[in-house]
Amino acid sequence: MGGAVRFSYGWLDYADSPGADLELLRGEARGRSGRASFSLQYRWYDGFDAVHHAWAGWDAGADSQLRAGVQQVPFGLLPYASHSFWFGSGYYLGLEDDYDLGVVWEHGAGAHRWHVGWFSGDEYGDGGRFDRYSFDVATTEALPYRERGRVALRYEFSEESERHGFAAGVSVSSGHIESRMDGRRHGHDAAAVHAQYRRGPATVQLQWARYRYGHPEPRIAMSAFMFPFEVAAEADVPTFNLAWEVQRPGWFDAITCYNDLSVTLPRGHHPGLRESWQNVTGCSIAKGKMVTYVDWIAGKNMWFAGGPGIGIDEPGGDGWRSRLNINMGFFF
């Protein structure tokens, strides 16, 4: 059994600042008996509560496990394609740290690791529910769609030593979204190539992802944290992250400073679309059961950084906007 409590402070250069607040209460449990295991986590935010994950697993071999339930979709760099509390652009597009209801088989053989998963839809099976942790396709009046079935495949090759670490792989997923108006289904595909290299205290993350929703409109609606918004229906999402772990940080257990850059580049020549940028510079500081993130988030035409959405061209998307976010968490 365990949990966490997190507090946050925010300052914005484009709107009224939220100030200091209680950001999260979290409860979790995990266990194991023989080959069987389980893990679950539930979260309470300001104004809503949501499941993070809830799965049961069975060990099928020395390095092989089958899991069923709400769990992370195996796609791209794992566990995250970022270092900051704010994540990268892929998180807000459903390409990073996305949790859905499904079955996943994970198998490792030396330097090789495979994931094969099938997901019935989002974690609630209801695109009209906006109060959730993971970003999923939203059912809105203008774009009434929801996720319906997806297969995810991921392969990674990795090597680790005391001073060096390298991992590279490829991820693909294919499924459908469903129109709530007429029940018609349209394709939903994504692919990514990804790599991570560590040398001493330095880490480099690289990823290029592409996604496509095959419905007629050039936009799709996404939602999480109670708010729906629109994004480009087809785009490339390159990511370039650098991190440096401070050696012998004195009183602290660990300090890691980073710069995470990601861009959303709409594909095609549809009117009403334009690129979005997000850059996060910051440090994570750990001491005992406390972890603090200090992040400066700069966004251009970027949701949650003063923009109207992601990859769309609407009033309010011009120019860079910034926000300071400090998050202090206590874990038990």
Image (cartoon, rainbow, N blue to C red):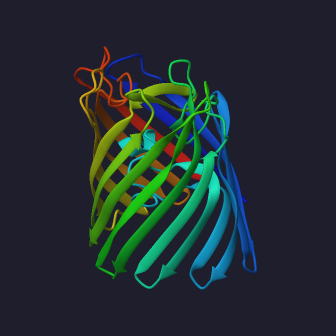
Quadrant of the rendered image containing residue 309: top left
Q: In this view, does 247 lie to the left or right of 303?
A: left
Is residue 284 shown above or below 303? below
Q: Position of residue 229 (x, y in %)?
A: 46, 25
Quadrant showing the N terminus: bottom right
The residue lying at 34 percent from left, 80 percent from top is: 159
Q: In this view, does 166 lie to the left or right of 59?
A: left
Q: In this view, does 277 lie to the left or right of 169?
A: left
How many numbered discs? 0
Q: Can residue 222 be seen in this view?
A: yes
Q: Position of residue 239 (x, y in %)?
A: 28, 50
Q: Is residue 280 visible?
A: no
In the foreground, 3 or 246: 3
Quadrant of the rendered image containing residue 268: top left
Quadrant showing the C terminus: bottom right
Is residue 14 shown above or below 35? above
Is residue 192 shown above or below 9? below
In the foreground, 58 or 243: 58
Q: Where is residue 190 in the image (x, y as percent from the top left)?
A: 40, 50
Q: Position of residue 246 (x, y in %)?
A: 30, 62
Point out the residue furthest to the right here: 33
The residue lying at 35 percent from left, 38 percent from top is: 234
